[in-house]
Image: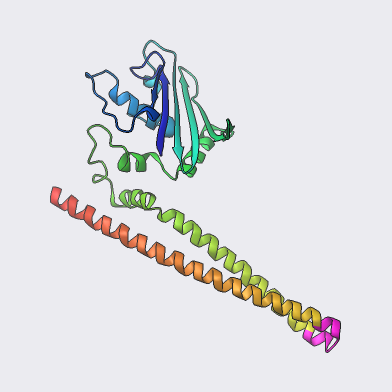
Amino acid sequence: MIPLKLKLSGFLSYRDPVEVDFTTFELACISGHNGAGKSSLLDAITWVLFGQARKRDETLINNASDTAEVVFTFHYEENDFLIRRILMRGKSSILEFQVRDGEKWRVLTEATSRATQARIETILRLDYDTFVNASFFLQGKADQFTQQKASERKHILSNILGLELWETYRERTAEQRKGLEREIDTIEGRMTEINLELGEETSRQARLKELESELTHLRETRKTQEMVMTTIKQAIDGLKRQAELVEKLDSQITQEKN
């Protein structure tokens, strides 16, 4: 994820509209007095992405404002996305999700905010816990990952390493293989019936050859799918070994801290 622009108004210490254009620099250092709004900029990013920050209720709204609004534009996997989240006092929050399509923005917003949030996390393959443990460390919580339960650390590591994505590919390939095997069984049954009923009739023999050719093609396709499954399984095994290694290192870190 590469941030492009961040706009916020009425959010925490930012009463008036503020825009940060990330395209004008490559490296930045945020400095200022306590309460100047340094952490608020980072909170704005987590809030607009996941609806979570150090606070989650109407205390996010600036005391002199009735509405908090954050708009975040970023580049991710060859696409530009825009997320807008609005919170008004006494009302439900509003969440909008868009993707750039040429010179225009195409709406990806779902019927409900919950469904829109789920779509954002699905596309990003990222949730709040993974983000704050891998890409963004909360103030005073740099050791948050090591304080997690083993199951939670495993979930976070799986998201970072992309194990869930490989598991999805494996399941899809397995379903395709089952479909091909069902087609092969059906064709073999049809071939048996043709052999019994049609005998040596020329036209029917020609049809039989067509089915045999189709069967050969399906068998070759199945072999290809089996090779793909083998490759995916090897990749999953490799990633799991990496996860186990990271978990061992994490355990060693925890033991050293204790």
Q: Nearer the viewer, residue 229 or 121?
A: 229
Q: In this orientation, does residue 51 appear?
A: no
Is 8 above or below relative to 169?
above
Is 155 above or below relative to 1?
below
Is 84 above or below relative to 88?
below
Q: Nearer the viewer, residue 114 or 184?
A: 184
In the rendered image, residue 116, in percent from the top left (x then y), is placed at 52, 35
What residue is at 34 percent from the left and 25 percent from the top?
41
Magenta stretch bounds: 195-205
In the rendered image, residue 42, in percent from the top left (x then y), is placed at 33, 29
Viewed as shown, does residue 36 lie left or right of 210?
left
Residue extending farthest top: 64
Viewed as shown, does residue 200 lie left or right of 126?
right
What residue is at 53 percent from the left and 37 percent from the top?
115
Q: Quadrant of residue 185?
A: bottom right
In the rendered image, residue 219, in percent from the top left (x then y), is placed at 61, 75
Q: Main secondary structure of the magenta part?
A: helix
Q: Quadrant of residue 12?
A: top left
Q: In this orientation, does residue 66 appear?
A: yes
In the rendered image, residue 142, in percent from the top left (x then y), is placed at 23, 38
**Quarter of the image with the N terminus in it:** top left
